[in-house]
Amino acid sequence: MKPRILAALIGTGIQASRTPALHEQEGDAQGLRYLYRLIDLEPLHLDINALPDLLRAAELMHFTGLNITYPCKQAILPLLDELSDEARGIGAVNTVVFKDGKRIGHNTDCLGFAEGFRRNLNDVARQRVVQMGAGGAGAAVAHALLAEGVEHLSIFDVDAARAQGLVDNLAQRFGSGRAQVGNDLENAMAEADGLVNTTPMGMAKLPGTPVPAALLRAELWVAEIVYFPLETELLRNARALGCRTLDGGNMAVFQAVKAFELFSGEAPDAQRMLEHFHSMNT
């Protein structure tokens, strides 16, 4: 008998998320009873302080697991019993599995970004890259970028201490010197081969661009993790100049592929999930 799956996404401002439909349709295709819900802190008038109660409630209601998104990916760490090696190394969790009375944290964002990068930007120059953002998603993306061969990564964040914390974390795994806190965006952009946005800037609810259009040039490649809208202002500006780009849909789909496997124990069809995602954006 195939398992029954009850899962949810916890985050703020997630009403437009494609994740529930991705999971449920793939569940349908595999003959699973798969129910996926949104737990949006914003309309519930809650914040990250509600995480302990939400986790406990999910356990009591026999949820299979939870996905975790902004702004909870780091705040949830002390509430978990175990972490996968990847989640521990990155210092952020986007997937929690309830198993044998334990809360086990995983990170599928790193794998998700890396898969999209390899499929779409595998041949790009990667000597110097600028990354905007050092939060939970930013930590996963930074690990993926260095693992994919980026030689020098400059990380910019509104919170300099958070950026320094991520740089220190990366040094433990990749050695010192490959990542540094950015302090001069104009110069860093002038020397960069690529740019990655891991901030929420560009989302429908947070319009704008993390990097002024004047700092972009045709030789740059530009990657985005925001996927609603799929074409952010940053990507629109980059494409107008002829830059190669990677939209946020790739990370959204490929992190969901791995999360589906963690929840269900079944191997999903990644290409089918990718096609379903794009069908929702037409």
Image (cartoon, grey):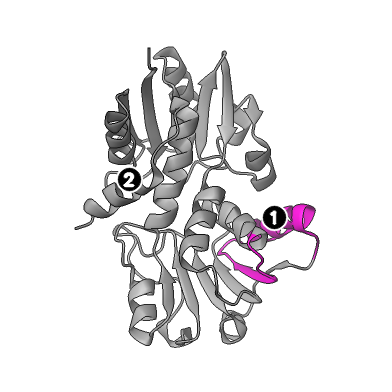
Q: Residue at x 32, y 35 (%)?
A: 26
- Asked if labels 1 and 2 touch by Cβ distance under 8 angstroms, the answer is no
Q: What is the secondary structure assignment of the residue under circle 1?
A: helix
User: Which image quadrant is residue 235 in?
Assistant: bottom left
* x and y percentages locating residue 240 in the rendered image: 33, 83
Q: Residue furthest left?
A: 282
Q: Which mark is residue 257?
A: none
Which is nearer the eye, 49 or 123?
Answer: 123
Which residue is under mark 1?
165
Q: What is the secondary structure assignment of the residue under circle 2?
A: helix
Label 1 Cα neighbours within 10 Å, binned few <14 / some 14-19 / many ≥20: some
Q: Is residue 155 magenta?
A: yes
* x and y percentages locating residue 76 in the rendered image: 55, 35
- For marks 2 and 1, give the CA distance: 38 Å
In the rendered image of this protein, does residue 25 appear above or below residue 6? Answer: below
User: Which image quadrant is residue 3 in?
Assistant: top left
Which residue is under mark 2?
272
Residue 98 lies left or right of residue 63; in this view the side is right
Residue 201 lies left or right of residue 153; in this view the side is left
Span of residues in magenta:
148-176
In the rendered image of this protein, does residue 209 appear above or below residue 204? Answer: below
